[in-house]
Amino acid sequence: MLNQLTISELTAKVARKEVSAREVMQSCLDQIGRIDGQIHAFLSYDAADALAQADALDKVVAGGAAANRPLLGAPIGIKDVLAVKGQPLNCASKILGKFVSPYDATVIQRLKAAGAIVFGRLNMDEFAMGSSTENSAFGVTRNPWDTSRIPGGSSGGSAAAVAADECLAALGTDTGGSIRQPAALCGCVGLKPTYGRVSRYGLVAFASSLDQIGPFTKDVRDAAMLLEVLSGVDHADSTSVPQPVPHYAAGLTGEIKGLKIGLPKEYMVGGLDPEVNQAVQNAVKQLQQLGAEVIEISLPHTDYAVATYYIVATAEASANLARFDGIRYGARVEGSDPISLYGNTRGAGFGAEVKRRIILGTYVLSSGYYDAYYLRAQKVRTLIRQDFLKAFEKVDVIVTPTSPTAAFKIGEKSDDPLQMYLSDIFTISCNLAGICGVSLPCGFTANPKLPIGLQVLGKPFGEETLLKVAHAYEQSTRWHKEKPIGKLTRR
Ligand code: GLN
């Protein structure tokens, strides 16, 4: 079925006119019609618009002008936090009401220019705050491998849609793991680029010093192809970095002999599920067999990462979310004066987790507490970054589990925010340090059968090496070829 293809398989077929963009798009829409009622990855999608984009691409191919469109005809789903002109933008929150984006985010402009079909609004935790997609104001997304379980979060809709073949790839965002963790839990590839690699223009900010946009794909080659399209400096985002963009897919040689892989001793912690641990140990052995050298390293400030993150991220969120005041965007609940209008709108518009974060963030920034919490967290953040930079003097990449457990049950952690926060333990440091990371499938739990993710972390702007290692491992296994089975996909 066309919706099961990878982008690299598809684009060649479209360019040779063996397959039309319309046929591919239709096959994704058919799959959504068949199964999204059970998964709820999409908040909405505009089928007519998606097919019109496909037809326009088919005209380009017919006219012989399809060159330089590396994503030709690939339907790509979009997390509901990125601006797509003319489409709703809600961040899975009630507070944005009927807001429609007036412009395209830079990443969306780049996808369109590369010949992708940009479609759909994918579910997420409200304002990207969460690890399970249960914080969406519009209902939970279910894991395609077991619909009684969460898909991870906050980009749960993106991960579930790719895993269930509802689109060929998707965009998500990662502030503390929101691409890598759901990719791990749904069995796809999720890449968080180095801070500054991809423009954030048109992304609704959660924590601006941590947020990055990245791809969800069915294999590592597609992640490389998408990263190449998304990357590069952008004058609309002053934090995007003018580093040259390598031809990432060309670096996937399969050759990793002599590369040095670091295993952080602090990551083999209690709370790590034995099956996850075993799968990661097996992956490390596999990498050794492929010729890599494995070295134990130390990241001594790991213990402070979760606490540091929940100070920095909430502080930035409390400032960023001040703009949702009932005046400028979306929904409004009237009041007798401006202050009560703000209060009424925000009280009715934000969900419980978003309110918790705004309150925490306001507290750590308030005078008298700023030095004790926010300033100290910034200093620890620097130490965490230095841990990584020091480790990368000895090794080329670092390998860890992505998540301490496979997908948990819906409702299992939703009443216990601390337990939920701890599920980010392996992904958060990467954002604090501003480095890059990818999660890819490395096995399954036995009963029930649930995907397990391997995380590979790389140096700042070291995506080439990161992808090379991930690809060499992937190509020596069959994990990425497995599909969710059961009543979901049985027709
Ligand atoms: N789960 C983390 C949080 O709740 C990370 C979220 C993210 O990366 N957007 O903040």
Image (cartoon, rainbow, N blue to C red):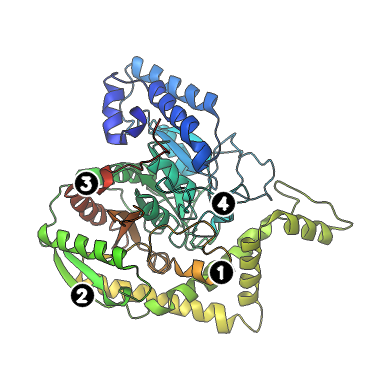
The foreground one among 470 and 231 is: 470
Residue 43 appears anywhere in the view: yes
Q: Secondary structure at mark 2?
A: strand
Measure how far apart labels 2 and 4 are at the Cα level.
39 Å
Q: How far across and down, in percent of the image, does residue 259 sit?
A: 15, 62
Q: Earlier in the sequence, mark 3 or mark 2?
A: 2
Q: Which residue is mark 3?
A: 478
- Per the image, the residue denoted by label 2 is 296
Name the N-terminal-most of marks 3 and 1. Answer: 1
Task: Measure how far apart labels 2 and 1 are at the Cα level.
Answer: 34 Å
Q: Is residue 446 left or right of residue 23?
A: left
From the viewer's perspective, is the residue at label 2 or at label 4 nearer? 2
Callout 4 amino acid: Val
Provide the residue designation for mark 1: 416
385 and 408: which one is in front? 408
Residue flagged by tag 2: what amino acid is it?
A: Glu
Q: Residues within 10 Å of mark 2 (few under 14, many from 20)?
A: few
In the image, taking residue 336 as reference, residue 181 lies left or right, namely left
Q: Name the N-terminal-most of marks 2 and 1.
A: 2
